[in-house]
Amino acid sequence: MNIKKIISFIKKHKLLITFLAITAVGLFLRFYKIESTVFFGWDQGRDAWVIHDLLNGRLVLKGPKTGIGDFYLGPAYYYLLAPFYMLMQKNPMASNYLNMLANFFNFAVLFYVTKKIFSPKIAVFTLLIYAFSFYIVVKNQIPWNVSLVPGVSVLIFYTIKKITEGSARTVPALLALLGFSFHL
């Protein structure tokens, strides 16, 4: 391959390459040797049993219980998690693979929305903070039902912004995102 073609390709796609590089490093920080550092607590054990029941034919209609009295979240997380448990033959480490996808989703949404609202430079800066913040990295290592909340919340914010700018066609997207968020 010609070196000029490579340089031309890099210049043409530098924002995408930057996004992928920061995301790759951010995911590496979160998931390198995750099997020895993962937090497996009560929530993850409960999720494993619910998925076990789900894969054995028991329909799940309510999600995890919150800390607020007798209030439950929706079951969307369990249905997203089930294929990973099925593919890994009910190994509880399967939740880490959904968590990896959720984190990639969060990186992509954060970058896209920040770029759309502000600028590519601000998007890169925001992504750097998200990728390297110790607190965020540690919290993102935990496979739990709130893993998708950052990305979904940013999308909700973006759809509300679009509606306030006069884009009525984003109302169905907002309603779908709000409904989905109540199940997380």
Image (cartoon, helix red, strand yellow):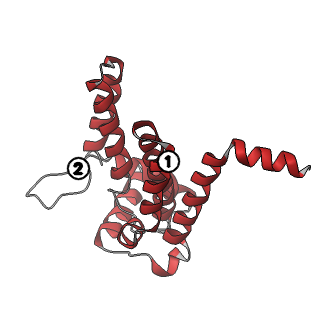
**Which of 72 and 90 lies nearest the eye of the viewer?**
72
Q: Amino acid at mark 1?
A: Ala
Give the image location of residue 90, x and y in percent: 49, 63
At horizontal 42% and vertical 55% (from top left) the residue drawn is 126
Mark closest to the chain's N terminus, 1 or 2: 2
Residue 108's mark?
1
Can I make out residue 64 in this image?
Answer: yes
Give the image location of residue 69, x and y in percent: 7, 58
Q: Amino acid at mark 2?
A: Leu
- Distance of label 1 from label 2 (alpha carbons): 25 Å
Give the image location of residue 79, x and y in percent: 40, 47
Q: Secondary structure at mark 1?
A: helix
Instruction: Find the residue positioned furthest to the right.
Output: 1
Q: Quadrant of residue 52?
A: bottom left
Relative vertical location of residue 102 with respect to residue 131 in this rendering, above or below: above
How packed is label 1: few (under 14 Cα within 10 Å), some, or many (20 or more)? some
Q: Secondary structure at mark 2?
A: loop
> For mark 2, what is the residue?
73
At horizontal 39% and vertical 64% (from top left) the residue drawn is 48
Can I make out residue 58 in this image?
Answer: no
**Which of 140 and 77 lies nearest the eye of the viewer?**
140
How packed is label 2: few (under 14 Cα within 10 Å), some, or many (20 or more)? some
Disc 1 versus disc 2: nearer the observer: 1
Give the image location of residue 120, x and y in percent: 51, 44
